[in-house]
Image (cartoon, rainbow, N blue to C red):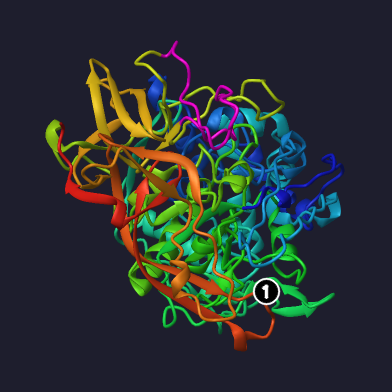
Amino acid sequence: MHRSIRPRTARRSRTGVRAAGSLATAALLLPLLGAAPPESPAAAPSARLQGAFASAAAEYRVPQSVLLGVSYLQSRWDAHGGAPSVTGGYGPMHLTDARTALARTVVHDHAEGDARGDDSRAPLKATAADVPTDAQLPARLKTLVRASQVSGIPAEELRSDPAANVRGGAALLAAAQQKLGKPLSENPADWYGAVATFSGADDAATAATYANDVFAVIRDGERRTTDAGQTVTLAAESDAKPQAAQIEKMGLRKANASDTECPKTVSCEWIPAPYEEFGDGDYGNHDLADRPNDQSIDYIVIHDTEATWEETLKLVQDKTYLAWHYSLRSTDGHIVQSIKAKDVGWHAGNWYVNAKSVGLEHEGFLTQPDSWYTEEMYRSSARLVKYLSKKYDIPLDRQHILGHDTVPGPTTANIPQMHTDPGPYWDWAHYFALMGKSFHRTAGPGGGVVTVNPRFATNQPVFTGCVKAGETCAPHGSSAVRVYAEPSEDAPLIKDIGLRPGGQASTTDVNDMASRLSTGQQYAVAERRGDWTAVWYLGQKAWFKNPAKQPTAVDAKGLVVTPKAGATEVPVYGRAYPEKEAYPAGMTPQAISPLPYKLLAGQRYVVGGRTMGEYFYSPTFDTTSHRVVRGEDVYYEIQFGHRVAYVRAADVQVTPSTVS
């Protein structure tokens, strides 16, 4: 999202949290608490977590498939070394303790760019977010406290011990089942309501979607090796039929979904962003348009919110701030739509991209130590992106499904202000796999292109600055691959003259995008030496380690651009605006200002798409003057560095990629 959304005051801890009805539930569970886990032979080290699920299921009389299915939808059975998720969830069961987790979240100062990125209007000022008090934290962010109450397991043990965490989750499921007046049945279908309750959702549609997803996992089965090397298997139970009627008896609210543009496979709610005038002719927090009739929607931009869920919704409804199209909640994948897809949100910091994109904000904090997102949010988001891709004919690739951190600065002055979310800890490989678009080899070594594709869990480049400047971040799986000036990890990192015009060295800071490739991005191969591969990147050769036994990129092919014959260099742009002759009389033409980079003769960059020069003119609240200006100039989008960029078709030639 926009770094301005992150809280700017110290985190406050909370005390004395106790969920309603916990004493009654604890009394119901007393017979279970006295039961000892079943005796079993010593498990192999890689099977201990599987054994923990079996023991907890027996102890609390929860069907093991239900316990495994819920855990998979929360964490894919990963323990994350005891570190919290972006919403304060711990362990395989994602038991939430926002009090502890948010105390670890660190506020960073970044340059605050204009989310509109439009030269025709004054920059939009940032708004600070509020820190939630203990009383404002919803029950879904306090499940670890409740699990401790109903199980008797100390909170610290639930946070740090995966087996204890599984027992705590089983205790919560059993408590929910009994509160619903249901028996502790061996039939998974009887647990539909308890599973829906476990989601923490406050509306019926989200609770039902979550429960349906859990039962889909149970029916299909899963097998996976976790981040701690544990092999966990959920055998398929094809006869596990969910009983959706149980939701009706839970008394959950009905979300307003009447105006939403979402697939039927997700829970979606309409909470509109205001289009209102205020002050001296100013207005917010988006622009009315008529897409795709007046201009195409070419991109979907993935953000993280840098705010809690409640604060995110508060900000998107602030007429003096800014707005995006969809917000996604981490704990249960619930979606809120706030702007119609036809309208233009202020979210990307580049007006050309804003005018041609849909913005998705995911609840999370980029620099929260060892931050991670729930499986249910990944799945919900992937379904939404796939739906939007089909509806608006947007290719499912990294050239069109952009991270906010890959949106280019529209001008040289904007480059240092561009945002860095969702950052290196967003699992792009898993995200695209959920959309049915896994990254894989599509050519031999002669294809001339590579697709970045490290194994997320084991790819753990060192980052700094999560807790404080210069301090090493906790180890974490990553989509990022670092690039160097020479084929050596002792060589200097690649420099970015746009980010640091003085030629200062790049850093390993978690928000420094200067020397970083990202999973799914494609680059033209410049050279290979042993375990190292060089690609063309920001006008230079950028080397990354790519050993055959553990590759960080796979061979591919595609179209590439090079300067036209006879040209030694061509300019690179951060937006594809039309030539000045295309603007009508009375409208000031937008500057076609090149970035400080050059595409040099002999270099090749992968083509992401072809587009006509366009500019959406909308500087006033009154829409009668709004207009889409189209020119004759044609541009190609290219993967130029970590961010995409544009070159004029008149300056380059397009050829199939091959190794020269």
Whole-percent x, y for residue 441 in the image: 20, 39
Depth check: 212 or 569 in front? 569
The three-letter code of the residue at mark 1 reads: Ala
Q: Position of residue 577 (x, y in %)?
A: 46, 64
Residue 482 in the magenta stretch? The answer is: no
Quadrant of the rendering where the C terminus is positioned: top left
In this orientation, does residue 448 appear? Answer: yes
Residue 355 picture location, percent across and down: 51, 68
Q: Quadrant of residue 517?
A: top left
- Please name the residue that numbered disc 1 is placed on: 273
Magenta span: 489-515
Q: Which residue sits at x=29%, y=32%?
A: 553
Residue 493 is covered by the magenta coloring: yes
Towards the viewer: 48 or 110 = 110
Residue 95, percent across and down? 63, 43
- Say whether residue 272 is left or right of residue 512: right
Graded by Cα atoms within 10 Å as few (under 14), some (14 to 19) or many (20 or more), the crowding at tag 1 reads many
Give the image quarter of residue 68. top left
